[in-house]
Image (cartoon, coloured by chain):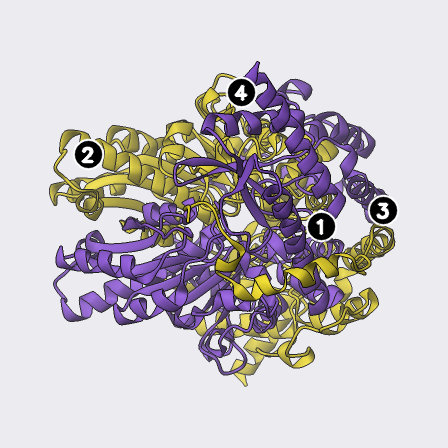
Chain colours: A purple, B yellow
Amino acid sequence: MSPVLFSHTNSICPAADHQTAQFILLRLQPPLARMDAGEFRRRGKEMVDYVADYLENIEQRPVYPDVEPGYLRKLIPTEAPEDPESYEEVMKDVERVIMPGVTHWHSPNFFAYFPTASSYPAMLADMLCGAIGCIGFSWAASPACTELETVMLDWLGKMLKLPDCFIAGTEGHGGGVIQSTASEATLVALLAARCKSVKRVQASNPKLSEAEICSKLVAYTSEQAHSSVERAGLIGGVMMKKVPTDFNYSLRGPLLQKMIEEDKAAGLIPFFFCATLGTTSCCSFDHLPDLGPICIKENMWMHVDAAYAGSSFICPEFRPLLDGVEFADSFNFNPHKWLLINFDCSAMWVKKRTDIIGAFKVEPFYLKHDNQESGLVTDYRHWQIPLGRRFRSLKMWFVFRMFGIKQLQAYIRKHVALAKEFESLVRADKRFEICAEVVLGLVCFRVKGSNELNQALLKRITKCREIHLVPCQLAGRVVLRFCVCAASTESHHVQSAWQHITQLTFELLQEQIN
Amino acid sequence: MSPVLFSHTNSICPAADHQTAQFILLRLQPPLARMDAGEFRRRGKEMVDYVADYLENIEQRPVYPDVEPGYLRKLIPTEAPEDPESYEEVMKDVERVIMPGVTHWHSPNFFAYFPTASSYPAMLADMLCGAIGCIGFSWAASPACTELETVMLDWLGKMLKLPDCFIAGTEGHGGGVIQSTASEATLVALLAARCKSVKRVQASNPKLSEAEICSKLVAYTSEQAHSSVERAGLIGGVMMKKVPTDFNYSLRGPLLQKMIEEDKAAGLIPFFFCATLGTTSCCSFDHLPDLGPICIKENMWMHVDAAYAGSSFICPEFRPLLDGVEFADSFNFNPHKWLLINFDCSAMWVKKRTDIIGAFKVEPFYLKHDNQESGLVTDYRHWQIPLGRRFRSLKMWFVFRMFGIKQLQAYIRKHVALAKEFESLVRADKRFEICAEVVLGLVCFRVKGSNELNQALLKRITKCREIHLVPCQLAGRVVLRFCVCAASTESHHVQSAWQHITQLTFELLQEQIN
């Protein structure tokens, strides 16, 4: 028997074969009774109203849910139904089952974590993205999906006044890509740096194996960096050292340089540094103009993670925070945090496309296409961890055009102003202290007193469910983070939040006295 | 100056500080003139109609675009606009700029790659997902998002008759998670296996460093496995060996066992095997009942990648293809391929949650929450590469309920029947040959003759843009892949496609004679 010819009787799935006749019968049956375009038109419009109703009235829902772990399983069947249920039944359950367990990130009373963006233009674009439903792993798989992405990253890069070397244009060696999250961008940068360093070391020491080199590679980041940076080191199998920060929780050159010297003396190979602009704990900024030249001198890849803060750099007054990015090999921030583009949309730029592509390229025959060797096309699958990708640049295009740069700037400024307003409320109350400089939309504060007191306050805030905050730890002290998050947050929400916090603090302090 | 108290005059962003007064003025201005709920209600309904129109009339569009690399950049400005543009302007450009460059994956004439799923219920759920817009990295970040996912993965696991050890339930040690893509699932499995193996080896050889152990770890997969498996090895920094397959392109036990023996004799540590059910080239199936016991005996993690084929296992007649999964540590398939749930939704199950969590766990203070140590909650960020995650289980819930299991089974069967129909057309024409057993929706075929002839045929098909196919390589031969992909594909599309292919073949062969 030929290796490429099969008889029906040698099936690897005999059961399937028996059923062939049955399948042909099936095909003669009437079409499947599933939702058709007509019903979608009706239900889709109902859903549009549901979405608008939800967002218009979100303030009436408690921002944080009152459910115990395991609540949901008890409310729904243990198995999927055999027969279809109606749209009405499902939507009834959205209110019964889902909404009671939702933390409402777009409530004007949500001040936890960092914002996640939401806007109507982005939602419209996502509907279109779902309908087109293409998978853009290569240029040929859907040219518009790849090309719009490249141009949108150029638009955004120019909005940020990124150095030209990061812009793809028609001639550039750099360019941008949408990753799902900042964590992935950090990992991709670290892997590209690892690959580049291994090649460089092997060029002068051809006998060293990749494993031997990797065991000596060392990466650095600030002790304030996001946990995903440490995780990138774990995944990439390289050492990741945490460098102490100054009193501003900001990393400066001398401490990094000192660590590098010690590590080199110990035979290690410094290869990667991840700087943070806008740390998660307190929105502090590493000092790129110091750190960049060190990385250049030491032949280390510098990746800049500005996940939250990056959106603000579209405002000229915040752009100085990005100074020094010209020294970076890669830069990333999340428009899905603060630029009105719904999750997921993490924008990453590299100076040299070939660095990043080299780290991942595996070319199977079924993904080859005519244009790929022309040098004219981008196959984004070589830029990222997953293979598949959605048409996410549509969201950028809709948002940039339907807001325009000026309105996006105004949006950022409004949030910063609201944070400043909260800061001045805190500063005016002597029972409280501000714990880190308020640069953007985050205010770190605490009740003067013990960590336990602050933890008790936070617990009470969470339990009341009127507003939602999360804590952080700064120099060993428990601190509350108040971050302006929702597009719907206005001054009166900030004022009410502060009133609520001071009221709970008053009660707590009273109880402690009694 | 206290390390946690800041004066206004020591700002790290002096520019920002100067603007504070200006911000406060800004806040007194009228609200931003952005799209409000009222306009969204109108535009959203228009978009619902656009989506329905697009999908109802998709057949009238050429399935493959007629554009050259770089086409899009010339059609739009080089920078984002300063001021807002209207929704009408943007939508006009969707037809002018985007649609001409789209490969229409949901056209009934799209037979390339593997399917990507699309259904109206999934799109409705995605609209809701966008509106809720929560980020589900921990239980507390939105309990419903985490809990629905766990229960939906249980539902789906039961639909597939996965062994109980993969079901979370209320007492189980296993459970499921939604990854973005199968590539990520493979990587997560490999990293979990790497972590487990390093710990095991270190337990008996405490002096060995992680790097030394990793340099000896060896993973295996079939030579027919997806390119992302090789890539997972590259990323994880471990050797990945490709094991030859039999005449069915299926991996069997003896060859794997032989390679393992040789590697162990050479001092290597076999630790991971990735089996494929339904390979990308030709939808062949590795023989789990042989391979599983080898992995158990050798203490190797077995991951099963059934990205495409997995959806079919909800039909009892295809479930035998999954036999042997009871030996696996992790199993993955993509409901976003063939189960009517729009991308992204890659379902992954593990037998022991602790294995996968152990490989990634980094716990920053700002993500801690009250319930996390209770053992009752799942924090999915420990299960995946990215930190953030959308509320993707809503799509599963909507699709499972609005179709019901029977209709989902009928959908799979219809596609298989259409593939069988195409197969019989090919078999009836002596100029062609079938190159691999047709088990599900993929038919691998070729014109009898040279690779060049088949490449020329494919080129002509692509150029005509009536149907779209991609090639693969099997045993050195160029083969055409005809995969039933779109929900809208009917028997008459398959018949026309075949007519088109034979017509082009006829012309090509005529030209060769002349």
Q: Determine whether B512 is above or below B34 in the image.
A: below
Residue A194 pos. (x, y %): 30, 59
- Judge depth for marks 1 and 4 and give the one in front: 1
At mark 3, the secondary structure is helix
**Residue A138 in view in this figure:** yes
Q: Is B141 drawn above or below residue A364 in the view shown?
A: above
Q: Residues within 10 Å of mark 4 (few under 14, many from 20)?
A: some
Q: Chain of mark 1?
A: A
Q: Nearer the viewer, mark 1 or mark 3?
A: 1
Marks 4 and 2, how far apart at CA: 32 Å
Find out whether the residues at labels 1 and 2 contact each other: C-beta distance under 8 Å: no
Q: Which mark is residue B169?
A: 4
The residue to which callout 1 is attached is A487
Q: Position of residue A397 (x, y in %)?
A: 68, 66
Report, in whole angstroms, how far the alpha carbon at label 3 lies from the one at label 4.
Answer: 36 Å
Q: Which mark is residue A45?
A: 3
Numbered badge on residue B201 = 2
Q: Amino acid at mark 3?
A: Lys
Of residues A388 and B159, the one drawn nearer to the viewer in this rendering: A388
Question: Are tags 3 and 4 found on a single chain?
Answer: no
Under tag 4, what secondary structure? loop
Please give the name of the residue rendered at 80% of the width and 28% of the height, measured from the top-left corner: A92
**Chain of residue at mark 2:** B
Q: Amino acid at mark 1?
A: Ala
Indicate the amino acid at tag 4: Gly
Q: Residue A507: horizontal and vertical position, in percent?
A: 63, 22
Badge 1 element: loop
* Whole-number angstrom distance, CA of label 1 to CA of label 4: 38 Å
Q: Are marks 3 and 4 in contact (CB under 8 Å)?
A: no
Mark 1 surroundings: few (<14), some (14-19) or many (≥20) residues within 10 A: many
